[in-house]
Image (tube, rainbow, N blue to C red):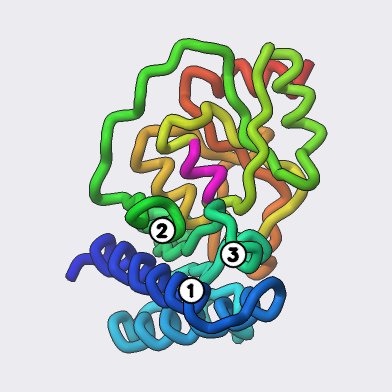
């Protein structure tokens, strides 16, 4: 099984576990979110340690031992990206499984289990981006949209599309539901590694909002900002941010 196949298989399987838990456990809200995080994390960590024992591993839900710094190949996972949305019974949450190689988000999959039939976007199976020629749609947090994104939307004549998790927002651009995902409120490596790997494979622009590259497997896992957008919008976004 290739790395890409493994990423997709694990993301999809973790998604099934989460949906079964949500539908049959009787939990809800924070209690459901905590149970989902624990169940999906246990599955992903055990599977990766079995399937790729020589690789490093970073998960939001496991203590970071620092051992990963000695590895060039590091799996970076978010068992439930959007725990709040998952616990609320919403569909805009995701499972992230990515492989960073020498600090680059290289291979990965993002599962959107609550969408009809379950959806998995992956780096080894690419579809053509839909054609869209209207004003840009910018996906933003449904509770605290970034000021920079609001400003860019206003100056470009765009529309804000509130949405839950980082993975759901990034995949909205991949799926043709939006053109720009600009985030400046701070995240961590597990929030964006898999989405960036998939978006890059689809030919989208991915960077920090100053245009510098997104680097992974760093000692400090905090990532202040990112921009994922269709390439035809990148220069205009940068110009608007500078202006």
Give x and y (percent) for residue 210: 68, 34
Q: Is residue 117 above or below residue 184?
A: below
Image disc number at residue 86: 3
Dot 1 falls on a residue whose secondary structure is: helix
Whether residue 203 sits left or right of residue 31 in the image: it is: left
Whether residue 185 sits left or right of residue 89 in the image: it is: right
Image disc number at residue 23: 1
Whether 170 is among the magenta residues is yes
For the question of whether residue 66 can be seen, the reply is: no
Q: Quadrant of the N terminus?
A: bottom left
Report how far apart the C-alphas of labels 3 and 2 lie in the structure: 13 Å
* Residue in view at x 47 percent, y 63 percent: 95
Q: Quadrant of the C terminus?
A: top right
* Residue in view at x 57 percent, y 39 percent: 207
Q: Is residue 79 above or below residue 119?
A: below
Give x and y (percent) for residue 101: 40, 61
From which residue to which does the magenta span run? Answer: 168-172
Whether residue 196 sits left or right of residue 65 in the image: it is: left
* Residue in view at x 35 percent, y 83 percent: 47
Report how far apart the C-alphas of labels 3 and 1 lie in the structure: 11 Å
**Looking at the magenta stretch, what is its main secondary structure?**
helix
Dot 3 falls on a residue whose secondary structure is: helix
Front position in the image: 124 or 40: 40
User: Residue at label 2?
Assistant: 111
């Amino acid at each position: 099984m290739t790395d890409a196949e493994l990423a997709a298989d694990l993301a999809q399987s973790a998604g099934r576990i989460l949906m079964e838990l949500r539908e049959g456990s009787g939990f809800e809200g924070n209690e459901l979110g905590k149970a989902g995080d624990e169940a999906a994390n246990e599955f992903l960590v055990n599977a990766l340690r079995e399937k790729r024992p020589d690789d490093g591993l970073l998960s939001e839900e496991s203590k970071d031992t620092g051992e990963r710094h000695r590895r060039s190949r590091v799996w970076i996972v978010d068992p439930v990206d959007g725990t709040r949305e998952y616990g609320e019974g919403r569909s805009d949450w995701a499972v992230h499984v990515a492989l960073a190689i020498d600090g680059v988000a290289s291979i990965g999959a993002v599962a959107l289990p609550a969408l009809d039939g379950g959806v998995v976007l992956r780096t080894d199976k690419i579809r053509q981006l839909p054609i869209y020629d209207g004003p840009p749609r910018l996906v933003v947090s449904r509770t605290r949209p970034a000021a920079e994104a609001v400003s860019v939307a206003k100056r470009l004549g765009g529309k804000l599309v509130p949405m839950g998790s980082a993975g759901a927002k990034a995949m909205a651009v991949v799926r043709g539901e939006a053109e720009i995902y600009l985030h400046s409120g701070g995240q961590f490596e597990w929030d964006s590694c898999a989405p960036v790997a998939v978006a890059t494979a689809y030919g989208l622009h991915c960077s920090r909002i100053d245009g510098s590259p997104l680097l992974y497997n760093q000692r400090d896992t905090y990532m202040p900002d990112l921009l994922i957008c269709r390439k035809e919008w990148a220069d205009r976004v940068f110009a608007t941010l500078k202006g």
